[in-house]
Image (tube, rainbow, N blue to C red):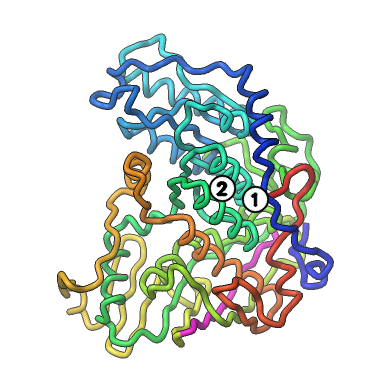
Amino acid sequence: MRSETPEHAENRAPSSVRNLSRRRFLRNSAVLGAGLALPTIVPSSVFGASAPSERIAVGCIGVGRMGTGDLREALGFPQVQVVAVCDVDSHRVEAAKKLVEARYRERSGAASYQGCATYGDFRELLARADIDAVQIVTPDHWHAIPTVEAARAGKDIFLQKPLSLTLEEGRIVSDTVRQCGRVFQIGSQQRSESRFRRACELVRNGRVGKLHTVKVGFGIDPGCDPQPVMPVPEWLDYDMWLGPAPWAPYTEKRVHPEKIDDRPGWLRISDYSAGMITGWGSHHNDIAHWGMGAELTGPVEIEGRAEFPKDGLWDVHGRFHIEYTYANGVKVICTDEQENKSGVVFEGDAGWVHVTRGSIDAQPKSLLEETIGPDETKLYVSNNHKANFYECVKSRAETIAPVEVAHRSCSVCLLGDIAMRLGRKLRWDPDKEQFIGDEQATRMMARTMRSPWHL
């Protein structure tokens, strides 16, 4: 399946911004809920000081490679009880159930504990009135719909990045989550790492002088050869896995291997993901925005180029170079790490700061010893990303990575993807979220969803 070309994009009209029917959802939820088996109430000994009446009941939607890691984290919090897991892969959902139940039996000493329900359809999980929050860790094309339905069902939401597959989806998700008053956090965990916060505070408080350039770098994915059509495994609900994406014949490298630790192929197919531009770009461009103080806006110009595979199954970008210009004149240069080193470099007229996972550097070195004064800009402090989410579920405060910030961090990446595909300079109004004078680019802000799925 090929990357969408500009010619193909011209034939795709954006889907209208249609709200999911609240009445339809509640009707379906009532039907689904009538036959659900609720888990056993867990004794207070399982949670120590956090008695069942005080716990946050959590459902996990998506328990694959990343989802299992997020599930393990949730199991580590005494104030959290995982009551349900959901996946279209029956092997994965059964493995997740065993993991949950083994952990709670270990805590309680009750060998007979059976308290985790399993689902193959996220709507059944969302229909449960006893679930307070969900963790959504699904392929990117399955981010928007479950998030919108979770918000409308009254659930708080932790969503793995990126927020959405398209700009239109991102705007709908952000608006819906805020209208429903839900606590939301995106999985941009670099915000909860002290080095990134330190770098951004130095920049926000003028320690590098007048900021003029931000350089962002991260890796790229390879392509792969054409793949044979394969029979759908008995453990996979493939039609549900495709969901709103176009129908395509099954082959293992389109979806995910049976071994949970192996990296899935969907990350490198444009019907399900934009590739590394959102995979890692959502992390590092988020930090660029944080340091620039541009968390709720975006660029005014975008220009990009990239190499795309000419054949084979995996069709997202390879080597790339994108330049974003912001209204204040700051330029963000986002490239693969063969051009820019991995991480984020903030360059000003008095020095620079480079931050990446596990390290921070600066020139002059004395910048690293600078003290941020009491009257200067202090950024949100979170030392554990998931703990911050669950604390905010309790307090109803805003998380360190809320939904509108998540949308803006994702949208800058999606703007870059459109620019790479078109290969020309684009003008953008970040307030109206519209391209200026470019109908072709505008049509690429949305994708038609496969029936019956829609937003």
Q: Give the residue furthest to the bottom.
A: 349
The mark that comes first in sequence, 2 or 1, is 1
Q: What is the x, y in percent for residue 353?
A: 31, 76
Mark count? 2
Q: Please provide percent x and percent y for residue 142.
A: 63, 46
The residue shown at (48%, 43%) is 157
Residue type highlighted by circle 1: His
Q: Which residue is mark 2?
A: 263
Mark toward the viewer: 2 or 1: 1
Taking the image as shown, residue 134 lies to the left or right of residue 202, namely right
User: In the image shown, does 81 or 394 lie closer to the viewer?
Assistant: 394
Instruction: Please say whether residue 315 is one of the residues in the magenta stretch.
Output: yes
From the image, tell me which residue sits under label 1.
141
Viewer-side residue, 296 vs 84: 296
Question: In the image, is residue 224 above or below residue 441?
Answer: above
Residue extent of the magenta highlight: 314-327
